[in-house]
Image (tube, rainbow, N blue to C red):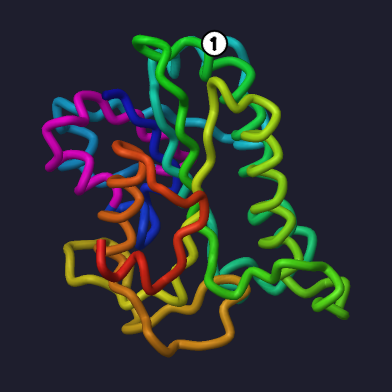
Amino acid sequence: MKVIVTGATGNAGRQVVQHCIQDPRVTKIVVLTRTAVSGDVESHPKVEVVMHRDFSSYPETLLKRLEGAQACIWAIGGRVDQLKHDKDLCRHVILDLPLAASRAFSQHLAGKTPEGTRFRFVLCSTKHAEKTKKSLPFVNDPRRYVTEAEKGVCEVAAVNKAQFEAYILRPVSFQVSNMPSSQPNTPTQKLVGSQSTAAAIESSQVGKAMVAVALDGWKDSVLENHVLVKM
């Protein structure tokens, strides 16, 4: 199975790549990234690193390289402080980018999967995504963007049910797993939209869950934190 992975330099994304490498069902990992990945990842025979600067745009040449993929694991995100408390940047990263990718992949990749299987788009969201805009009085509350991203990705799937399906994973916050990294880690990192560090889940477990859903799907389209910790 060929899988696209984004956010591979982040805490969850690094774990996604490792679980993909370890799973024999994954035969090809296309790491779509703006920045360099570690040498051990780049040199792995399963991995193809594709440098891509603008995740809001998917030119034909790039889509050709992605053809044959059966899933995309979307792990691009960040904490509000990582996004410089910039509401426009928050909107761009949290909302605009996953919507652009899901639309492009639904339109150009979903009909080209082996044996006509449905393309799976697995989005790492957050536990505190609100279900209605009425509960979010502040226009610039980043949870609004999380909610809109979930809604938008699910709408893409609804329009193309025969060829494309979307799954939303909602971890509370990451308990960073011990692993080699060039970047310093803090013990617990809250996700955009998350209000609590309670019931933190290890990033390795999030990665494991995302890969499992990409490979096998799930009975529900939304997987809450208590489900993720048991997978």
Is residue 54 visible to us here? Answer: no
Seen from the viewer's position, the closer of residues 28 and 151 is: 151
Estimate how packed mark 1 is, as few (under 14), some (14 to 19) or many (20 or more) residues with alpha carbons within 10 Å.
Answer: few
- Which of 108 and 88 lies nearest the eye of the viewer? 108
Residues shaded magenta:
16-35
Rendered location of residue 81, percent (x, y): 60, 76
Q: Is residue 32 magenta?
A: yes
The answer to which image quadrant residue 133 occupies is bottom right
23 is higher (above) or lower (below) than 129: above
Give the quadrant of the N terminus: top left
Give the image location of residue 153, x and y in percent.
64, 43
Quadrant placement of the C terminus: bottom left
| 80, above or below 96, in the image | below
Asked if one can make out residue 14 in the rendered structure from this viewpoint, the answer is yes
Q: Is residue 158 above or below residue 184?
A: above
| Mark 1 residue element | helix
Q: Residue at x 17, y 62 (%)?
A: 180
Instruction: Find residue 4 and report its image quarter.
Output: top left
On the picture, is 56 further left or further right than 29? right
Disc 1 target residue: 61
Q: Amino acid at mark 1?
A: Thr
